[in-house]
Image: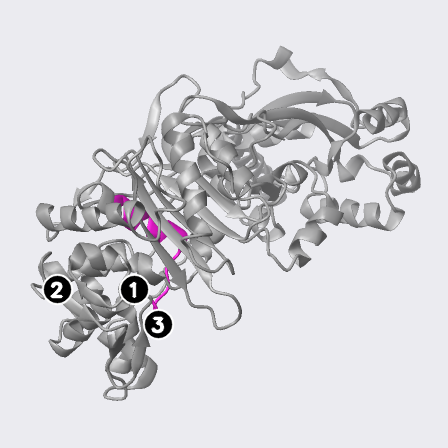
C-alpha cells in the first residue's frame, strides 16, 4: 500500500475515533444532565411511563356555627373515571346502558375527556349510585380504561337548617378555569356561591397522588413501592362562623312564604348571627350531582330564589334612614335634641310633601318616635341650602351606605348614596336642585340600600358609634386547630358624639314604646329600640322595613328586615324582627308568630 494512501487511512481512522469519542461524550453528558442535574424535573415524567398517577382528592373543610355545632360536612360518593388512551369507543353503548344515559350524551363527555388529556385519568360522572357502581364493577373486565374513585359531596347534618345563600353550593369547574389552572382538572368541583366560593381556596385542601403500577394493557398491578412514594392529600381548612344555628333555623321558619330578607348582627363585632333571603333554594338538591329539573325550575322562578336579597337587593331605606339623618343634623349643628319644628300635617317647598304624623310641635326624639316627615324634610332642606350636601353624603357613608360593606360573601352591591358629583353626572351641572334632593331626608328618592347595609348602620347606632366589619367567618382553622385567620375589629367614627347618639337611641326606644313599633315590637321582658320604614315602590305595593337593637341598655343583637310588597313596615317587618330578637335573647317565643 502506498505510503500516501496509508497516511490518509490513518487520519480517517483518527477522525472517526475522535468523532465516536465526542459522540459518546455528548450522550453521556446528556444522560448526566437528565439523570442527575434534572432528576427532579424528569423523574416524575419517567414514572408516568411505567406507572399511572392517580389523584387522591382531599376532604373539603368543614363549617361550624358560633357554638361549634357542625353545619356542613362531607358524605362519601363514587365517581366514574376514564383514561381515554385505554378506552375502546366500541364499548360506549354498553357503558351508556349501565349508566342509563343516552349514548350521544356519554359520547360528548368522553370527547371532553379526550380533549382534556389522552393519557390522564379524569372524571366521567360524579355521584353514581351504589347500584350503578356495582353493575359497572361486574362488567369492568369488559371496560378497559374505565375506573372509579371515592370522593365526597357536601352534607348538611342539621335537617331543618338551610342557610342556602350563606353556605352556597359547589359546581363543576369550567373549561376555561381548568385549562388555565395547575390545580383543577376536568370534572373537579369548585365553590359557585356563598362561603363555598369566598373561601374556596381555604376549603378545598391539597390534592394527593398515588402511583399505580400498570401493565402494557393499562391494567393495574398494585401500588408502586408499596405506596412509599405516594403524596398524601391535605384536608381543607375548617370555617368557624358567627352564625347561630338555632336563630338561623327560626328566622328561616318565620320568613317562609315571604319575599325579602332578614339579618341579625352582633353589634359589637359585626358577626352575622343569622341571614335569610326569602325565598330560599333547596341547598341539598345542589349538593353533588345537580338535579337538572330543579335547577331549571329555580332559574325560571319569577321570585328568583337564587338571588340573595340580603346583600344584593337595592331599595330606598324609607324612614329607617331618619335616625342617621338625626345624627347628621346634630353634628352639623342644624338641630339640638331640644330643637322643635312645627308640623302642620305636611311640609311645603314648592309643593306639598305629605306627613302621616299628627300635626304639632316635634323635637328630635318625638320626630323619630312618630316618624315625622316634616321634621326631616326641613332638616334636608337646611342641609342643601347651607351647602352641606357633600358633608351629608360623607357622614351617611360612615354608616356603610353607598359602598360595599366588605362582607365575606360574593356579589354584594354598593347601593346608591348621591352627592353633588352624582347629580351633576346624572342631570348635568346646574340642572338639578332642592326638588331632587329633599326626599333623601326621609330615605326616599335617588338612594338605595341593601338589608345588610341597614343592619350595619343599626349596629353602629346600637354600639355607640363604632363601625363594624360584617362577617360570617370568625376564624379559619387547620385540622390541628391552628388558627390561620380571624375577623376584623371595630373602629370609632370620630364625629359621632356620645350624648347625640344617646338622644337618637332614646328616640328609637320611644318608637317601640309609644310609636308605630309598639303593636308588634314591644316585648315585655326585653327593652327594644327600633325604627319602622316604608319604601315607596312605583311598580306595586310598597316595601316594609324595620331596624332594631336590643337590649336597649346593653345591645347584643341588631336586626334589619325588609319585606317586599308588604306595605307598612310597622305591621309587616316589625313582627319578624321582634320574634328574632326574642328568640335570640330568651331562647323561647311566648307570643303568637307572624
Give the residue number, with chain letter if any, for mark 2.
Answer: 340
Q: Position of residue 15 (x, y in %)?
A: 55, 40
Instruction: State the residue lying farthest toward the top.
Output: 226
Cα–Cα gap, marks 3 and 1: 23 Å
**In percent of the image, x 71 and y 37: which residue is there?**
123
Residue extent of the magenta highlight: 444-459
Q: Position of residue 473 (x, y in %)?
A: 39, 34
Q: Which mark is residue 357?
A: 1
Q: Is residue 157 above or below residue 450?
A: above
Which mark is nearer the camera, 3 or 1? 1
Left or right of 504: which side holds 481? right
Give the residue number, with chain letter if any, for mark 3.
Answer: 446
Instruction: State the residue lying farthest toward the bottom.
Output: 431
Q: Is residue 333 above or below residue 61?
A: below
**In percent of the image, x 28 and y 58: which residue is there?**
370
The chosen color scheme is one colour
Which quarter of the rendered picture does the N terminus lie within? top right
Crowding at dot 2, Cα within 10 Å, few <14 / some 14-19 / many 20+, comes out as some
Residue 324, visible in the rendered structure: no
Amino acid at each position: 500500500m502506498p505510503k500516501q494512501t496509508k497516511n490518509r487511512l490513518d487520519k480517517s481512522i483518527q477522525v472517526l475515533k475522535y468523532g465516536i469519542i465526542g459522540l459518546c461524550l455528548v450522550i453521556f453528558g446528556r444522560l448526566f444532565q437528565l439523570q442527575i442535574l434534572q432528576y427532579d424535573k424528569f423523574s416524575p415524567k419517567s414514572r408516568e411511563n411505567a406507572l399511572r398517577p392517580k389523584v387522591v382528592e382531599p376532604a373539603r373543610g368543614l363549617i361550624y356555627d358560633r357554638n361549634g355545632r357542625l353545619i356542613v360536612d362531607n358524605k362519601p360518593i363514587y365517581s366514574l373515571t376514564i383514561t381515554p388512551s385505554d378506552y375502546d369507543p366500541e364499548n360506549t353503548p354498553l357503558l351508556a346502558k349501565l349508566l342509563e344515559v343516552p349514548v350521544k350524551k356519554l359520547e360528548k363527555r368522553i370527547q371532553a375527556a379526550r380533549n382534556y388529556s389522552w393519557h390522564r385519568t379524569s372524571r366521567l360522572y360524579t355521584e353514581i349510585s351504589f347500584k350503578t357502581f356495582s353493575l359497572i364493577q361486574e362488567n369492568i373486565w369488559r371496560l378497559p380504561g374505565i375506573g372509579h374513585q371515592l370522593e365526597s359531596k357536601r352534607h348538611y347534618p342539621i335537617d331543618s337548617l338551610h342557610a342556602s345563600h350563606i353556605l352556597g353550593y359547589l359546581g363543576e369547574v369550567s373549561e376555561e378555569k381548568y385549562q388555565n389552572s395547575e390545580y383543577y382538572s376536568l370534572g373537579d368541583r369548585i365553590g359557585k356561591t356563598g362561603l363555598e366560593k369566598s373561601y374556596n381556596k381555604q376549603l378545598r385542601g391539597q390534592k394527593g397522588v398515588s402511583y399505580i403500577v400498570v401493565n402494557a394493557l393499562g391494567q393495574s398491578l398494585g401500588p408502586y413501592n408499596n405506596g412509599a412514594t405516594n403524596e398524601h392529600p391535605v384536608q381543607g381548612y375548617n370555617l368557624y362562623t358567627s352564625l347561630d344555628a338555632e336563630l338561623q333555623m327560626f328566622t328561616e321558619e318565620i320568613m317562609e312564604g315571604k319575599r325579602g330578607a332578614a339579618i341579625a348582627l352582633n353589634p359589637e363585632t359585626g358577626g352575622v348571627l343569622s341571614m335569610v333571603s326569602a325565598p330560599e333554594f333547596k341547598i341539598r338538591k345542589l349538593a353533588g350531582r345537580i338535579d337538572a329539573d330543579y335547577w331549571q325550575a329555580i332559574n325560571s322562578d319569577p321570585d328568583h330564589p337564587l338571588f340573595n336579597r340580603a346583600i344584593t337587593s337595592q331599595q330606598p331605606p324609607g324612614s329607617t334612614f331618619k335616625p342617621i339623618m338625626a345624627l347628621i343634623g346634630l353634628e352639623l349643628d342644624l338641630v339640638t335634641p331640644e330643637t322643635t319644628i312645627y308640623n302642620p300635617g305636611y311640609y311645603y317647598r314648592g309643593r306639598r310633601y305629605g306627613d302621616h304624623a299628627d300635626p304639632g310641635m316635634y323635637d328630635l326624639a318625638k320626630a323619630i318616635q312618630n316618624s315625622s316627615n316634616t321634621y326631616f324634610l326641613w332638616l334636608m332642606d337646611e342641609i342643601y341650602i347651607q351647602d352641606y350636601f357633600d358633608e351629608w353624603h360623607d357622614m351617611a357613608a360612615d354608616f356603610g351606605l353607598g359602598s360595599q360593606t366588605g362582607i365575606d360573601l360574593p356579589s354584594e352591591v354598593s347601593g346608591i348614596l348621591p352627592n353633588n358629583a352624582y347629580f351633576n353626572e346624572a342631570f348635568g351641572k346646574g340642572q338639578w336642585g332642592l326638588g331632587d334632593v329633599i326626599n333623601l331626608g326621609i330615605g326616599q328618592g335617588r338612594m338605595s340600600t341593601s338589608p345588610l347595609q341597614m343592619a350595619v348602620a343599626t349596629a353602629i347606632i346600637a354600639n355607640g358609634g363604632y363601625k363594624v366589619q360584617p362577617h360570617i367567618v370568625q376564624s379559619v382553622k387547620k385540622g390541628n386547630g391552628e388558627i390561620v385567620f380571624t375577623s376584623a375589629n371595630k373602629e370609632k367614627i370620630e364625629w359621632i358624639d356620645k350624648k347625640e347618639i344617646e338622644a337618637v337611641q332614646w328616640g328609637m326606644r320611644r318608637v317601640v314604646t309609644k310609636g308605630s313599633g309598639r303593636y308588634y315590637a314591644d316585648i315585655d321582658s326585653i327593652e327594644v329600640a327600633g325604627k319602622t320604614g316604608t319604601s315607596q315602590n312605583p311598580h306595586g305595593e310598597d316595601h316594609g322595613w324595620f331596624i332594631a337593637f336590643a337590649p336597649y341598655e346593653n345591645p347584643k343583637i341588631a336586626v334589619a328586615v325588609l319585606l317586599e310588597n308588604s306595605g307598612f313596615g310597622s305591621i309587616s317587618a316589625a313582627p319578624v324582627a321582634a320574634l328574632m330578637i326574642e328568640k335570640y335573647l330568651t331562647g323561647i317565643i311566648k307570643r303568637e308568630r307572624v
